[in-house]
Amino acid sequence: MKSIKSIKKLKNESGQSLVEFALVVPILLVFILGILEFGWLLNAKITLTSAAREGVRAAVVSTVSRDTRAFNAANEAVTGVSGITLINDSAHYNYYEEEDTVNNIRNAVVEIKGNVEPIIGLFVDNPFVINSRAVMRIE
């Protein structure tokens, strides 16, 4: 049987856990939302890098209209994924070929800036711009 002193002690501490919970929950919530946002943007970066690689691969295996084929392949790779949108203009998409005079080869290069819609929007601007670049040898 509990003594009267222990019962009085419990009555005096009845709101303490509620106050501690109210102080910790906002910090914990911001931390969890930050993790979710970071994961979303990291996934978008990986997806955009993969899209740039797909675009440069489409350009390398093609013999005509490499620029158009590269953009179409990259755009197809990100359509409907991670909230990424690609814009076909010189500020967001660039395809060019560069000469490697040391190794005597030509490389195709695709540079993409993708606009990503953040999942939460508390930590980054809307839309968030992610850059990606892929280089592949033309054979």
Image (cartoon, grey):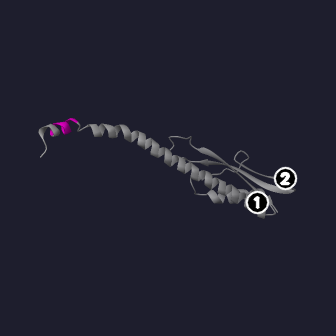
Q: Nearer the viewer, residue 69 or 13?
A: 13
Q: Going by the picture, which residue comes out furthest to the top?
A: 12
Tell me which residue sits at (78%, 55%) in the image.
108
Left or right of 36, for residue 134? right
Tell me the mark number nearer the camera, choosing from 1 and 2.
Answer: 2
Query: What's under tag 1, amino acid-wise?
Result: Ala
> CB of mark 1 within 8 Å of CB of mark 2?
no
Residue visible at 74% across and 53% down in the picture: 110
Q: Amino acid at mark 2?
A: Asp
Mark 1, Cα crowd under 10 Å, few <14 / some 14-19 / many 20+, is many
* Residue 83 in the image, given as x and y percentages of width and height: 57, 52
Q: Helix, strand or loop at disc 1?
A: helix
The 10 Å Cα crowd at callout 2, few under 14, some 14 to 19, many 20 or more, is: few
Q: Earlier in the sequence, mark 1 or mark 2?
A: 1
11 is within the stretch colored magenta: yes
CA gap between label 1 and label 2 equals: 18 Å
Q: How many marks?
A: 2
Residue 73 in magenta stretch: no
Q: Which residue is mark 1?
A: 59
- Residue 70 image point, x, y percent: 73, 58
Question: In which image quadrant can residue 13 be found?
Answer: top left
Locate residue 95, reporting x and y percent: 76, 52
Q: Residue at x 65, y 60 (%)?
A: 76
Q: Dot 2 corresponds to which residue?
A: 100
> Which label is found at residue 81?
none
**Which region of the structure is painted magenta?**
7-12
